Image (cartoon, coloured by chain):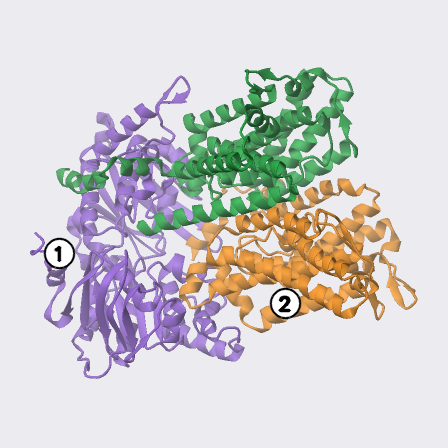
Amino acid sequence: MTSTQTVLTGELRAVTRPHRFMARHASWIPVFAAVGILVAMVVGAQLYFGKFLTPRLVSSILLDNSYLLILAVGMTFVILTGGIDLSVGAVMSFTGMMGASLLRQGLPSSVVAPTMLATGALIGLGVGVLVQYFDVQPFIASLAGMFLARGLGFVVSLNSIKVTDRPILWLQGTRLQAGSGWYITPTGIIALLVVLVGAGLLAYTRFGRTVYAVGGNEQSARLMGLPVARTKLLAYVVSGTCAGLAGVIFTAYTGAAYPLNGIGTELDTIAAVVIGGTLLTGGSGFVVGSMIGVFVYGMIKTIINFLGVDQSWTRITIGALLLLFVVVQRLIVARSARRR
Amino acid sequence: MSLTDEEMTSDALVAMRGITIQFPGVKALDDVDLTLRGGEIHALMGENGAGKSTLIKALTGEYAVDAGSIAVAGEQRVFHGTADAQQAGVSTVYQEVNLCANLSVGENVMLGHEVRRAGRIDWRATHRAAVGHLQNLGLRLDTRTALGSHSIAVQQLVAISRAMVTEAKVLVLDEPTSSLDRGEVQQLFAVMRDLRSRGVAVLFVTHFLDQVFEISDRCTVLRNGRLVGDYPIDELSPGRLVSLMLGRELEDLAALSGASDRPVDRSGTPVVRMKGAGRKGLIEPADVDVYPGEVVGIAGLLGSGRTELARVLAGAEHADSGQIEVAGKAVRLNTPRHGIDHGIAYSPEDRRAEGILGDLTVAENIVLGIQARRGWRKVRRSEQDALVSEYIAALGIRPANPHVLIRNLSGGNQQKVLLARWLATAPALLILDEPTRGIDVGAKADIQSKVAELSEQGLSVVFISSELEEVLRLSQRIVVMREHRKIGELASSETDVDGLIDFIAHEGREGAA
Amino acid sequence: MNAVMKHRLFWPVVVLLALILVNTLSRPSFVSITVQDGRLYGSLIDILRNSAPLMLVALGMTLVIATRGIDLSVGAVMAVSGAVALQIIQDSGDAANPSVLAVAIGAGLLAGLACGLWNGFLIAVLGIQPIIATLVLMLAGRGIALLITRGFITTINSDPYKFMAQGYVVGLPFAFYVSLAAIAIVAVIERRTALGVLTEAVGINPEASRLAGVRARGIIWGAYAASGLLAGFAGLLYSSNIMAADANAAGLYIELDAILAVVLGGTSLAGGTFSLAGTVVGVFTIQTLKSTITFLGVPPAVTPVFMAAVVVLVVLIQSSRFRRWVGRLGGRLSVRSAQPVERTEVAS
């Protein structure tokens, strides 16, 4: 055995400390890049507008984007497995419609909110079954989910339904102040909790690690004896559940449900996840990165508001930023492939 | 790895009996037996299509059997998937390392067996356990680095460590050595011997005869989906093993031995001349020339730069230094297209990933070379038919049906189709990178004799192979590569396999030492 | 009979015919065609006319999918080209001037082509995944269209422009001739030349194709350019139909319809061999379905539920596992469930 040892310890030569850090944490680099972009944007805006960064503004970014944050967490699971979930926006809208309608019929929110989550989970399960058991491409399967949810939303009602339920409105209306303008709403707390739970699931459970393994190489994961089918299914269920929860949050946020809500939200979500450093090919990325991605998205919206220019610039900027990130990711991948 | 006395002494750890697997239209396995004993390395031999991989997949639970029984450690088993087989103690390491490159080394070893505390994974303990398992095989690695940043050899050993985590009693190694160089093979063998001494049954599948004789204790031979026999390795000679695999004595190969002695006229202009051409990070600047009718072999270990040299020569990699002359004129060679336009044809190393187009037919695959050259202008049907039937006959492609999808052909026949694709373009120089890797002996002989025949007719060939006998037999001159550098040139008439190995291992090294 | 059933167009055509049959049975007027002022009218004619934008987009999508790609930006490209053309017409103030129209149409097509070239550049040159590269334009494209129309819905009044989508030639809608011409041109370019098989080669194995001397980069780039150009034309048709450039509504979800049409036609999303005839059948199927849904009195907003049902049905029929499953229900109990793909590979 000695001969084996002498030859292979050569692999350990990874000399300097930064080199070793890089070797171990290479997958975090895109997240750092997203943080860099966020900081650069804040600094730039601060210099340009003078007094841009206030506690109020930071608090409002979380407030305005908590539904997106929740969607992004769910989407991260799916993208990590190498899939994609286009249904999230429509599911959010549909569960919102359904919830609002049930509330109007007098059901208590303690029943309605779990029902919304369960409905989201069910649609996610359906998409997952199509993907896993019938070899349907994730893109197409979730598209079916999107069509279904979008249509069902209109079946509930073609018009907006106002929500008057106290507990639901409380989620958004309550501002827990922390002095000097800082505040947080229950919706924000829920969103941050979802991030925490998502990150914990991915980093510290076998399910989470299997998500990465499946995204890295599904065939290998299967041959390694990992529960691939269950894991992929669960990833879509997580995303669906998150979409259901986002339905609750978004209903609270707008105080009403409207069947046209959330059109294009799936794209915003994907953009935020990718900007946050998750590779669309799967197997690499972090929930925390997606959170940064959502903040970048929120910051762009805010800055464009500040500039007072047309909101269509938001989409253009997001598109440009998405492009920038994808190109940079591409270069990183190409460079590491060359080094090998 | 602790085995009970009973398991140690029980004769067969794995007993597969009367295994029959039926595919649509063909019996892949017909009444095959396989017996593996604890503490032995057992080779599984056979030509491509003999049923080796089907038998392995039956053992590892990927395929269900139509008839027959599998007993592991004396217990009858029916596997419904690889997880079942692993549970029963049968683990497999595949040729194309089936691990997750995006995860860390430690995770790959421990995935599914992580150390958990209070419901969450204890990473520190998990990595500690992984380090332990790796050390058992003599590997010392930073388990927190990504698996993808390590060489294939290390990845393979990590895969074996993983198998040991699952307490494998039976380890199946499917072609583990085909992408390893000599030193790495020795490391692997050391690990295999160690496992053998611990009572593990190792099933070793390979194409390399010498490796079988070097390491195995017993050998099961399959032919056409049937069992030929189970032999102690001491009772076999290489010649006998080959004849068992083929069912016929092989004389074709011996007849070729004269090819390397054929004189080549090197007075004129070389067909292709590389002058200090190289590419940063891939290959150092090198000089190579090839004359009309000459076969130039490239020898060296895997990763020595022999493929990179070929790719630069073919334009598949863009040289960033020096120049390349075709028929005495310097040419631009930035893409494979440029190479093809100058009559340089390159058949790549990885047949499946870079050579064939699986969903196209044999005919379409053959015509693709000239079609690409002509651009949008379609090759006429009549011309195509004539060409295709000519090459199918000339190279003995089976099945001789131009309209089957190429992915349904055996490796050897796929290689012949690729050869046909390039010959159809009437190249001045044909570069063959590992044209005989992973194909059966019959097809190998066909391809070798075709190369010899073509070069005699004036075609220039660059021939790359891991099998030095083959390189020596076919080429008149051999360029030797090491560490991405050309270290010298030999005339094959002046050397033999041992001489060549010595040259690869030592030439130019004394100075450095 | 068996040979007919095995033909790749068999199932797509059966689906289309079944749909037409169901429609005819429930309302015989469906197949009736009336002549008025020398023009044909009827549900089938409407389908021919209304399917034109989708036809153009789906043809482009077929080429893109054959290269193993996808073009999500077609809807946004439609919005851009419509916005460009109508803004030029509106700004000129002379909506009937043929040269203004020519410039507007030319500029709209060029805008579409430019979008396609941009996508192709990202994918073929920079090597970015198609789904993401085109997602960029999908996100940004409508924003750009809104900038061009300065945030409004640009409306014009121009009879010649209107003719594109609503005019008639020899009894049939002009838009249908546009469809026919596009089908013919694409089919001739792909199948009369070697471009089709080279495209398939690139879709099956890009690296092997490159090494075989196929100009893979050019072919991929070309496919996206064609898709952009065709989507640009579709955008003009759309704006001509409503005589307005609506950056938000133009071509909304058309990428999904187009992908569905391609898949319905039997072309695999995994790239490689493709069928233009299949796509044509797929487009008519989707258009017929939409007309059916409208006829059934379903509010247009609920249409997606039906589309979802179709998507699920189609992908299930294409799924080998589902077929096996149905076969098992049918009593032919099969004990083994190993993947047939791997099996054939080994069997050879």
Corner quadrant of residue B157: top left
User: In the drawing, what numbered circle is on residue B505?
Assistant: 1
What is chain C's hue in the picture?
orange
Corner quadrant of residue B8: top left
Q: Who's the residue at 42% across and 34% down the image?
A: A226
The quadrant of the image that shows the C terminus of chain C is bottom left
Residue placed most toward the observer, C229 or A131:
C229
| Chain that is purple in the image | B
Q: Position of residue B229 (x, y in %)?
A: 27, 50
CA distance for labels 2 and 1:
58 Å
Residue C7 visible somewhere in the drawing: no
What is chain A's hue in the picture?
green
How many other residues sit within 10 Å of disc 1, few (<14), some (14-19) or many (≥20)?
few
Disc 2 marks which amino acid? Val
Residue C311 visible somewhere in the drawing: yes
Q: Who's the residue at 15% across and 40% down the image?
A: A6
Vertical position of residue B251 compared to residue C322: above or below:
below
Residue placed most toward the observer, A184 or A114:
A184
Q: Secondary structure at mark 1?
A: helix
Q: How many marks?
A: 2
Q: Which residue is mark 2?
A: C186
Disc 1 marks which amino acid? Ala
